[in-house]
Amino acid sequence: MRSISLKHLRYFEALARHGHFGRAADASGVSQPALSLQIKELEETIGTSLVERGGRQIALTPLGAAFARRARDILRAVDELGALARASQTPLAGRLGLGVIPTVAPYLLPALVKDLAARHPDLQLRPREAVTAKLLEDLVEGRLDAAIVALPVSEPALVEVPLFEEEFVLVRPAAEVAAPIPTATDLGAMPLLLLEEGHCFRDQAIAYCKPSPTVARDVVQASSVSTLVQMVGAGLGVTLVPEMALAIETRSADVAVARLPPPRPARTIGMAWRKTNPLADHLQRLADAVRNLDRPAQLPVANAS
């Protein structure tokens, strides 16, 4: 009789997570027939079905759902055994999965990757860009070692370490450069451009501006800060942008930037990792490296009078 292998568990966990043989195979880096064979072998080994097949999507049997939860626990424990071995080696060495939210990744990662490559040549950094909810899911499930996100995340299983704070800056069409800088109340009545749902920066901007119901229904959405700024340059409205994005995103757009009246909107960027991660000391050193980075030089920004 075959025994259950880690390969069986990893492929089954991928199938349970994606709910689709093709996507699970892509995520696992194997062909769909190879993944299907491993799932079939697993079911034959335990003597019952874990998956209800039919149509494009799959559903787990009641046993399959319980099996998936236990498989995730086992795989996380195995991964942490590997991390325990890595923790005894030279600091910041080996493979390290780091998630970064989209409103930080383009502006922080280039400098971070360059800095770590120079100071820690044995570190194999594997960055992944995704929205906060996906990063936290992958972090808790052990698919990432750490994530750079906006704090707080309020996840009991995670450690949160603040890195730096940054303000949100108003971006409006260049023709409005001499116009009075709006207050938060004024912004709530203006055509506001926001990121799509799922981005924490969108929620933070809405919390500050509190757009009226009429404005909220007509909000123009974008998938990136770059698109937001370009739409402002085209005259579609105004937006708020994280300060670290200004130097890159406004250089080719016909826009004006200004600081809002106090109390200005801001966010705390931090790093999070599992409390049980044996690499905690290494991750603290990584957090220190991010904190000490020379971030992109900021443009001069007019202050509200």
Image (spheres, helix red, strand yellow):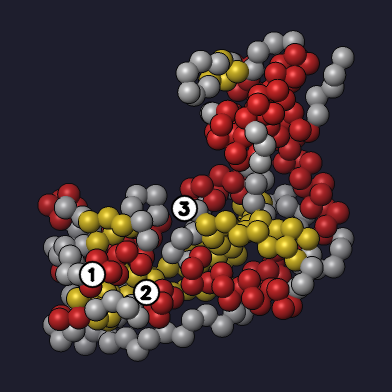
Spatial CA distance of label 1 from label 3 is 23 Å
Q: Which mark is residue 249?
A: 2
Where residue 39 appears, as percent x and y from the top left, is 69, 23
- Rendered view: 183 above or below 105: below
Label 2 SS: helix
Looking at the rendered structure, the kind of residue marked 3 is Val
Q: Which mark is residue 131?
A: 3
Q: Nearer the viewer, mark 2 or mark 3?
A: 2
Q: Say which residue label 1 marks.
A: 232
Looking at the rendered structure, the kind of residue marked 1 is Val
Where residue 112 appears, as percent x and y from the top left, is 61, 73
Question: Taking the image as drawn, is residue 17 in sight?
Answer: no
| Residue contact between numbered discs 2 and 1, judged by CB atoms under 8 Å | no
Q: Residue at x 76, y 45 (%)?
A: 79
Apparent side of residue 77 relative to residue 256 in the rendered image (left or right): right
Label 1 SS: helix
Where residue 193 appears, as percent x and y from the top left, is 24, 61
